[in-house]
Every structure is written in C-alpha cells, then in structure tokens.
Amino acid sequence: MRRPSRALRNRLDATIRARRRRTIYRMLAKRHGGTVPCFVCGRHVREKNATLEHIVPTSKGGTDDISNLSISHYQCNQRRGNGEPAVCAKTQTAGSATHGP
C-alpha cells in the first residue's frame, strides 16, 4: 500500500489540529460561561482568533496532551514564544489594543 503524499499528510494534520483547537475552545467556553480567556493576556478570545497554546512549551519538556494545552490570541502566542505567560502579560500595557478581542 502506498503512503499518502506529503501534501495530503499536511492537510490531514491541519484538519486534526483545527478540530482539536475547536474542541478545546468549546470546552473552555462551556467551563467559563461562554467567555474564553486568553492564556497569556486574560482577554476574551473569539473562536476564529483562537490558537492552541502549550502551557509548558514543548521546548521545555511540555507535551501535546490536552492537559498541557490552552487557548490564546495568535499575537499573544507568538509574542510569548518560549517565555512564561505571566512575564509576557506584564509586557502589555493595561487596556492596550495590541490585538483584537
């Protein structure tokens, strides 16, 4: 049996990641009464702007297990990189409009 092409594997991986992100987002929305806080800045994240965030970065030994995943804004996720969320949140000024809700 032939292996699927790399392009097909990438599309399948992207589909799985998107489903996982939606599932986690909806679980958090239910837990928080409809408002999903960003793991980094604490502001509400709309589903279309949500990205999966590793609580403990994989580079520091974190896993892809659901217990190590949360939701953040794309910009917060990128800004945080491998840093600690509390440190990253302090770099943003209160009420700043550095990203959308």
Image (spheres, helix red, strand yellow):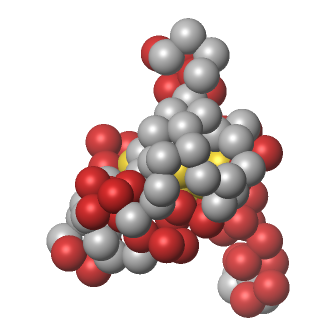
Q: Position of residue 45 (x, y in %)?
A: 64, 39
Please report the residue visible at 47 percent of the width from the left and 15 percent of the height from the top.
31
Please report the residue visible at 78 percent of the width from the left and 45 percent of the height from the top.
48
Foreground pick, 25 / 43: 43
Please report the residue visible at 71 percent of the width from the left and 77 percent of the height from the top.
9
Please report the residue visible at 19 percent of the width from the left and 71 percent of the height from the top.
61
- Quarter of the rendering occupied by the C terminus: top right
- Quarter of the rendering occupied by the N terminus: bottom right
Q: Position of residue 30 (x, y in %)?
A: 55, 15
Foreground pick, 98 / 46: 98
Q: Is residue 33 above or below residue 6?
A: above
Q: Is residue 16 above or below residue 81?
A: above
Side (left or right) of 8 relative to 86? right
Side (left or right) of 24 relative to 64? right
Q: Position of residue 33 (x, y in %)?
A: 55, 10
* Name of the residue lying farthest toward the left: 61
